[in-house]
Image (cartoon, rainbow, N blue to C red):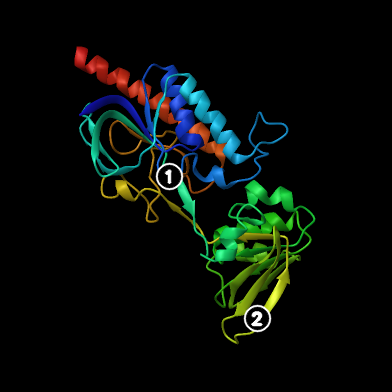
Amino acid sequence: MEKHDCVIIGTGPAGYTAAIYAARADLNPIIYTGLEPGGQLTTTNEVENFPGYPQGITGPAMMEELRQQAERFGTDIRFGMVTKTELSKIPGEYHKLTIDDSTEVLAKSVIIATGASAKYLGLESEKKMMGHGVSACAVCDGFFYKGKDVVVVGGGDTAAEEATYLAKLCPKVTLLVRRDQMRASQIMQQRVENTENIEILWNTETVEVLGDKTVSGVRVRNNQTGEEQDIPAEGFFVAIGHKPNTDIFKGQIDMDDTGYIITKPGTASTNLPGVFATGDAQDKIYRQAITAAGTGCMGALEAERYLQEHEEMVES
């Protein structure tokens, strides 16, 4: 069975940044790509808010550059998915990882960078228009819809935040809520209600995202009356939440009630020795590429320190 000092699970900004730092520290990191190499950014057409790209860059191109940078310093990038983990509670012991339900490897330190997946409605038209008017992140993509009418779907805090953010950029924001009330906190509901260019359609569900090459509107249905209508819009923002990709760690690592890994304040450390969580797997607040990269750096530096301390323990 292979034994490694550092194994990184996931290849988004957090995973690749962790790999760059770990490789430069001579930890000889192994990184497993998962089913979606590059993570959520591979579905983002334009990235204009990541420092160092004054002209912007596409998500896939950015992830390719990060991959090349990680490889340049000696990262062993492997296409495979970690399907099972047996994480030790004893400092200095190896953690066992199962790859693709078959191969097992041992790691002295594990950096989790599995990210989170945006929840979508599951419509075929929604999938077709992904990156062409359909988005799950207003902070990431809202700038491209400045001066255009948009639709936001959702009834929680995320939807309220997205709608009020977009209302600063767009002439009109239509918020679709499938019930007769929002789940958002009272303060967020008040912000929505007090924003003049947000219109709320209650008891309303999305039937279809309209458009040929880009979004031109949204067909909705009132689930009480059955009445349908088409709303002209150039952007459709799905804000029904995210699901952290952390199922394989359940029962081993401390998590909150929605599955986000809990890290010690100001660190990437989990409750288990030698296990570090980075990126969207532990961040439900910011969920940005730059913050994910920052925690990837933290995870690698902490893994380096952990390995050094363990080495000293063994030598003493």
In this view, the residue in front, 99 or 40, is: 99
Relative to 126, residue 75 above or below: above
Note whether residue 186 is visible.
no
Relative to 20, residue 252 above or below: below
Residue 251's mark? none
Task: Write down the residue under mark 2.
Answer: 228
Counting from the top left corner in percent of width and height, residue 182 is at 56, 70
Secondary element type, mark 2: strand
Amino acid residing under circle 2:
Glu
- Image quadrant in which you'd find residue 229: bottom right
**Label 1 – label 2 distance at C-alpha:** 38 Å
> Could you classify mark 2 by the number of other residues whose Cα lies within 10 Å: few (under 14), some (14-19), or many (20 or more)?
some
Relative to 170, residue 58 above or below: above
User: In what quadrant of the picture does the N terminus appear?
Assistant: top left
Residue located 70% across and 58% down the image: 214
- 1 or 2: tag closer to the N-terminus: 2
Task: Write down the residue under mark 1.
Answer: 281
Residue 111 as seen in the image, left or right of residue 105: right
Residue 156 as seen in the image, left or right of residue 307: right
List the single residue furthest toward the bottom. 225
